[in-house]
Amino acid sequence: MKIDQGFQKLGDYLTGAKNPRKKPPAYEWQDLALKVIKLLNIPAFKKNSVFKAVKDYPKSVIVTALNDTLELCQTGEKWKYFFKVLASPPRQSLPEESITGGEQKKALARRPRSNFFSEWDKKL
């Protein structure tokens, strides 16, 4: 049973001021990006970069970078550390007995960085 509140403004009904409705994310990667933004307190000027990174990289890479950031970065700006972790190449795990000296450096081959993160490095 509704409580009678008397006359109200017509504009309140049209704008939905009392109960604003938010659309759910259309894609799974958008939801993941919103979680990253919320967890790391990403500033407004870097939110687009998070959406681009989450769209371009596989979910496993983003989740790993997020976990590493939350675990390793206790103080300071976590969002900067997140982008550094994302830009760093993944290390390949090989059995230690098969690697010796100079072969170890070759085994840990780096993948080329994307243009997205090379612009980021220039700003730092």
Image: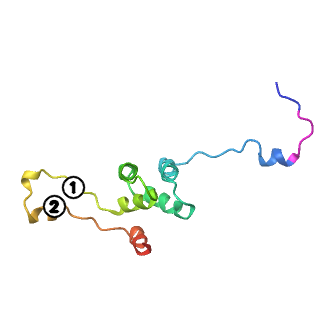
Q: Is residue 4 above or below residue 65?
A: above
Residue occupying the point 40% across, 49% down: 70
Q: At numbered mark 2, what does the secondary structure look like: helix, strand or loop? A: helix
What type of secondary structure mainly makes up the magenta span?
loop
Q: Which residue is mark 2?
A: 107
Residue type pointed to by label 1: Gln
Residues at discs 2 and 1 in contact (Cβ within 8 Å): yes
Q: Which mark is residue 47?
A: none
Residue occupying the point 51% across, 47% down: 31
Quarter occupied by residue 7: top right
View extreme (front): residue: 75
Q: State the image coordinates of residue 113 (x, y, percent, origin top left).
A: 33, 68
Seen in the image, is 35 located left or right of residue 73?
A: right
Q: Which mark is residue 92?
A: 1
Which portion, as a residue range, is magenta? 5-10
Q: Is residue 6 above or below residue 97?
A: above
Figure quadrant of the N terminus: top right
Quarter occupied by residue 18: top right
Q: State the image coordinates of residue 94 (x, y, percent, origin top left).
A: 15, 52
Residue occupying the point 51% across, 57% down: 42
Query: In this orientation, which residue lies closer to the viewer: 5 or 111?
Result: 5
Residue type pointed to by label 2: Ala
View extreme (bottom): residue: 122
How far apart, in angstroms, are the residues tagged by discs 2 and 1?
A: 7 Å
